[in-house]
Image: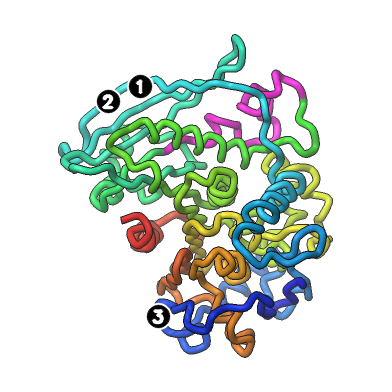
Amino acid sequence: MPFVSRSIIASSLLLASSAWAQVGPDNNMRPSWKANPQVVQKLAAKRGEFNYDESKVPTFQLPDPLTMNDGRTVSDAATWTNTRRPELMDLFRHHVYGHRPTTDYSVEFTQVSQTEVLGGTAIGRELKATIKIDDRTFSFPFVVFIPTGVDHPVPAVVLINNRYFTPVKKVTEEYDSFIPVKDLIDRGYAVASFFTSDVDPDRADGYAEGIRSFFANGQPPTDDAWRSLSAWGFAASKVLDHLETLDTVDATKVAVVGHSRGGKTSLWAAAEDPRFAIGYSNHSGCGGAALSRRAFGETVARITSSFPHWFTPNYAKFAGRENELPVDQHELIGLIAPRGVYVASADEDLWADPRGEYLSLVESAPVFAVLGKQSIGQDVMKDPSLRSHVNPPALDTPLVVGQTGYHIGSGGHGLKHTDWKLFLDFADGLLK
């Protein structure tokens, strides 16, 4: 049966009473975050046509991730893996992100340069990925940084950079909290990154210049064909293809990371590609980690009209009708299970609906449970009396439970040093 409204209805899935242990205080005992009234007032004055008031969140029903299309309930891991997960993937492809092409292609990687960086603690490489279909090719650049002086393959992070391309020299000589290469190298991680617009231009009129047009041989996209978010996720998988060729990287321990639109992409990339060990969404909001049905901050209507190239036209059909969507974003997080998922929000970024991002993690709990993994939200499944206490943890206080983690950081929209630190603390627990 579906979950209901602003509070949480527990899944009918039965759990062994001793199976789950939450890191830190129980959900109903720990300090929690609530939106700063001054921030609410400021944003409401600036964008009065959008809702920032919890009391005005509409009543809604969330689809139960464990209820199959024929109405049966998933009760074991095999049924989830073989039946329900493919059903949900098809629903998200059709209604939200689009179907990737099935055209045969090959990919090759060319090293453009290699430089010793960061005082000899890392090697920086600039590379090019070239996709070939018959006699046509499409290329995009990316960078890789690998720690030196280690005697074992290291875990890695693939950053989907939605801001700019980061040449090796620039990113290692000028500190950039968006891609803090030195911090990551010091923590024992390899780093790879590409710029989204080098793969598929991030503008509504950029189709002809990008990889989607290349795969379609210049033909216009069908309504359920992949859009830019999926194309950027595809590129992340190609970068992972390259990391798999490196003896210095443990390609079974790679996290895909993104901020804002990149965070939407990282979640879908992790759903599409089960090789990614962790999906990390930073301030991804509507169409990312936040529940669409809450219509809090950015809405389906606004995002699909402002960025029509990110989603299929089918998604726009649910503008103002979010409760009729056959999926919601808690199910996207569930599609990454049993692998790791980390979600970060920001105190002043109500546009991205921090509470809605956290609730997606909570509502994905039944999937992790049926797969035998601990996650945020399973205390609510066991004890429905906690429904009224489901709030994000206190500001700058991470919550980690099993395969999932969350924090809401100080300040506004951005990928900051603290976000990286808290995420890497989480990643260390799963990848090291």
Corner quadrant of residue 24: bottom left
Contact between marks 1 and 2 (CB within 8 A): the answer is yes
Range covered by the magenta-colored residues: 193-219
Residue bearing the label numbered 1:
111
Name the N-terminal-most of marks 2 and 3: 3
Q: Mark 3 packing: few (<14 Cα in 10 Å), some, or many (20+)?
A: few
Q: Is residue 251 left or right of residue 268?
A: left
Q: Is residue 113 above or below residue 295?
A: above
Name the N-terminal-most of marks 1 and 3: 3
In depth, the one of 52 and 111 nearer the eye is: 111
Q: Quadrant of the N terminus?
A: bottom right
Q: Comparing marks 2 and 3, which lies closer to the viewer?
A: 3
Contact between marks 1 and 3 (CB within 8 A): the answer is no
Q: Is residue 252 left or right of residue 10?
A: left
Q: Amino acid at mark 3?
A: Gly
3D distance between C-alphas at marks 1 and 2? 8 Å
Q: Is residue 361 left or right of residue 317?
A: left
Residue bearing the label numbered 2:
114
Kind of element beneath mark 2: strand
Does the magenta portion include 334?
Answer: no
Instruction: Name the residue located 60 percent from the left edge and 32 percent from the top edge.
Output: 201
Residue 321: image location, x then y, percent: 83, 61
Q: Is residue 200 above or below residue 338?
A: above
Q: Kindly identify which numbered label has been placed on residue 24.
A: 3
Instruction: Name the residue located 61 percent from the left edge and 73 percent from the top edge.
Output: 40
Residue 341: image location, x then y, percent: 50, 59
Q: Amino acid at mark 1?
A: Gln
